[in-house]
DNA sequence: CTAAGTGCAAAATATTTGCACGATC
DNA sequence: GATCGTGCAAATATTTTGCACTTAG
């Protein structure tokens, strides 16, 4: 990946941690993962680098779940599912078209705007949490 | 509206303020609107009531834009557009189907979850902001 | 030498909450 | 008089930032 050239060791480690999980973690989770192997890592550095990654187009914010920003290094367009009980964030695989292919044009025309991106999030209970609910 | 019965004067005012705007405001905006006419209103009360409304199903959180939660009293399912420059939030009118009608079933099956709600947000530049951009 | 990356702690921001008081039923 | 709603201020929680120091080129 071109943009990754000349990354510092810490920046590299933060990116790799993010890229190697599908949990759509918070900044703090990334920090906790790395802290044991990089004892002099600071949380501020993780925040700063996550901002850098967003600017470089290497990561996206999936959304803010329970007040915490959730990050994803998978830049392919895909919806997410958020379990409102355990707050886990799951990728929704796309096997058929979710949205109308001219949707950006439609929104642009209807709203008089320029559309550059979108985000789809489903909410509900994941498998484990549904069982734990009592109705 | 059934659930609105027996609302206190302040709760009523907060709801009405929210219901009478399409700006998808923050808690503070609602507070600022009401403060002149209700001088002894406190911001904590606005927050508390917005939480009450969410629990009663009278409002929804559109999302968190720039760290601030944006509220909507229009409970009909509709996407939103967020201008990443001025941070305005606009309703996207639905004139044709955006999403596959069996989408919840699809997500449920693919992810092994129960889907109860969803949220679609488009990002880009609104009309005014596009003009102000220089490319 | 210069610019970039970082630790640390303080600051900034948004939201929640404990407590006492007042209103409502 | 019990419950609910509230003001106020303190507390929380998350994220950002200033500053000094280090490191890489």
Image (cartoon, coloured by chain):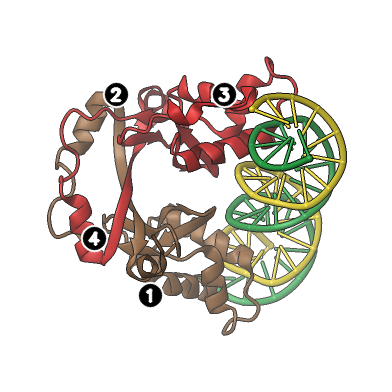
Chain colours: A red, B brown, C green, D yellow
Q: Residues within 10 Å of mark 3 (few under 14, many from 20)?
A: some
Q: Are marks 4 and 1 on the same chain?
A: no
Q: Nearer the viewer, mark 3 or mark 1?
A: 3
Q: Nearer the viewer, mark 3 or mark 2?
A: 3
Tell me where residue C1 sits by quadrant.
Answer: top right
Q: Taking A77 as reference, is A37 above or below it? A: above
Q: Are marks 3 and 4 on the same chain?
A: yes
Label 3 vs 4, first from the N-terminus: 3
User: Which residue carries the number 3 mark?
Assistant: A12
The subunit carrying tag 4 is A
Q: CA distance from mark 3 to mark 2?
A: 34 Å
Q: Are marks 4 and 2 on the same chain?
A: no
Circle number at residue B104: none
Q: CA distance from mark 3 to mark 4?
A: 38 Å
Q: Taking B78 as reference, is B45 above or below it? A: below
Tag 3's secondary structure? helix
Asked if marks 4 and 2 touch (Cβ < 8 Å), the reply is no
Question: Which residue ends up furthest to the top in the rendered image?
Answer: A37
Q: Residue at x 61, y 31 (%)?
A: A28
User: Which residue carries the number 1 mark?
Assistant: B20
Question: Which residue ends up furthest to the bottom in the rendered image?
Answer: B37
Q: Residues within 10 Å of mark 1 (few under 14, many from 20)?
A: few
User: Which residue carries the number 2 mark?
Assistant: B112
Tag 1's secondary structure? loop
The subunit carrying tag 1 is B
Q: Taking A111 as reference, is B104 above or below it? A: above
Report the quarter where the N terminus of chain A lies: top left
Report the quarter where the C terminus of chain A lies: top left
């Amino acid at each position: 990946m071109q943009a990754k050239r000349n990354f510092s060791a810490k920046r590299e480690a933060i990116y790799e941690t993010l890229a190697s999980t599908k949990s759509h973690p918070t900044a703090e989770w990334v920090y906790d993962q790395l802290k044991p192997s990089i004892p002099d890592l600071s949380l501020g550095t993780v925040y700063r680098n996550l901002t850098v990654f967003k600017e470089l187009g290497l990561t996206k914010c999936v959304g803010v779940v329970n007040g915490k920003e959730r990050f994803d290094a998978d830049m392919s367009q895909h919806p997410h599912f958020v379990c409102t009980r355990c707050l886990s964030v799951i990728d929704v695989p796309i096997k058929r078209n979710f949205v109308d292919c001219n949707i950006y044009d439609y929104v642009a025309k209807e709203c008089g705007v320029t559309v550059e991106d979108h985000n789809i999030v489903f909410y509900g209970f994941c498998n484990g949490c549904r069982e734990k609910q009592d109705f």
